[in-house]
């Protein structure tokens, strides 16, 4: 009896995980990591490479800067075009940390439902990390 209820619990947990994965994009909790770089229409492209995000090494802060209005759907694709290094990505309150190995990309969609300024940065240690800490998402009320 004990083992049966344990199996049932595991099945429930798996089903819950599946549901969370299915609904996570609209909640801004997650996205998907794929190989290669593809920018779907309407997405903001962030290229991570040996110069940071979209050449952030050569830009003043904040960079990159994304500005939207509250309630707007934000669509971002991050492509790691660095030939060697992994890079990370995270936006406070909106996008959980993700790690991309060389050649991988990450697409995420979320509704910017909370106004404010949210830091956007690399979530792992990488060779150009100090240039990837000053991104900003501005959500205007
Ligand atoms: Cu980094």
Image: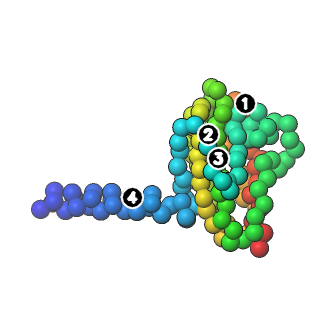
Quarter of the picture holding the C terminus: bottom right
- The reply to whether dot 1 and dot 3 touch (C-beta < 8 Å) is no
Q: Is residue 45 left or right of residue 36?
A: right
Is the CB of mark 1 within 8 Å of ligand 1?
Answer: no
Image position, residue 137 (x, y; %)? 74, 58
Question: Which badge, 1 or 2, is on the more N-terminal residue?
Answer: 2
- Residue position marked by numbered label 1 in the rendering: 50
Between marks 1 and 4, how big is the CA–CA gap? 35 Å
Between marks 2 and 4, how big is the CA–CA gap? 27 Å
Per the image, label 3 sits on a secondary structure element best described as loop
Of residues 62 and 49, the one drawn nearer to the viewer in this rendering = 49
Quarter of the picture holding the N terminus: bottom left
Image position, residue 76 (x, y; %)? 66, 53
Mark 1 is surrounded, within 10 Å at the Cα level, by few (under 14), some (14 to 19) or many (20 or more) other residues, namely many
Mark 4 is surrounded, within 10 Å at the Cα level, by few (under 14), some (14 to 19) or many (20 or more) other residues, namely few
Q: Residue at x 70, y 52 (%)?
A: 44
Q: Nearer the viewer, mark 3 or mark 4?
A: 3
- Residue position marked by numbered label 3 in the rendering: 39
- Residue position marked by numbered label 2 in the rendering: 37
Between marks 3 and 4, how big is the CA–CA gap? 27 Å
Image position, residue 39 (x, y; %)? 64, 47
Per the image, label 1 sits on a secondary structure element best described as loop
Question: Which badge, 1 or 4, is on the more N-terminal residue?
Answer: 4
- The reply to whether dot 3 and dot 2 touch (C-beta < 8 Å) is yes
Of residues 82 and 116, the one drawn nearer to the viewer in this rendering = 82
Per the image, label 2 sits on a secondary structure element best described as loop
- Residue position marked by numbered label 4 in the rendering: 17
Q: Nearer the viewer, mark 1 or mark 2?
A: 2
């Amino acid at each position: 009896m004990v083992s049966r209820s344990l199996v049932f619990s595991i099945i429930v947990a798996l089903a819950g995980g599946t549901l969370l994965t299915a609904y996570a994009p609209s909640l801004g909790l997650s996205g998907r990591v794929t190989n290669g770089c593809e920018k779907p229409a309407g997405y903001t492209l962030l290229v991570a490479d040996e110069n940071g995000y979209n050449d952030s090494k050569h830009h003043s802060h904040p960079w990159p800067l994304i500005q939207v209005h509250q309630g707007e759907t934000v669509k971002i694709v991050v492509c790691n075009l660095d030939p060697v290094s992994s890079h990370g990505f995270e936006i406070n309150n909106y996008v959980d940390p993700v790690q991309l190995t060389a050649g991988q990309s990450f697409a995420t969609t979320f509704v910017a439902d909370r106004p404010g300024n949210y830091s956007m940065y690399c979530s792992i240690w990488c060779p150009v990390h100090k240039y990837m800490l000053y991104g900003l998402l501005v959500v205007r009320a």
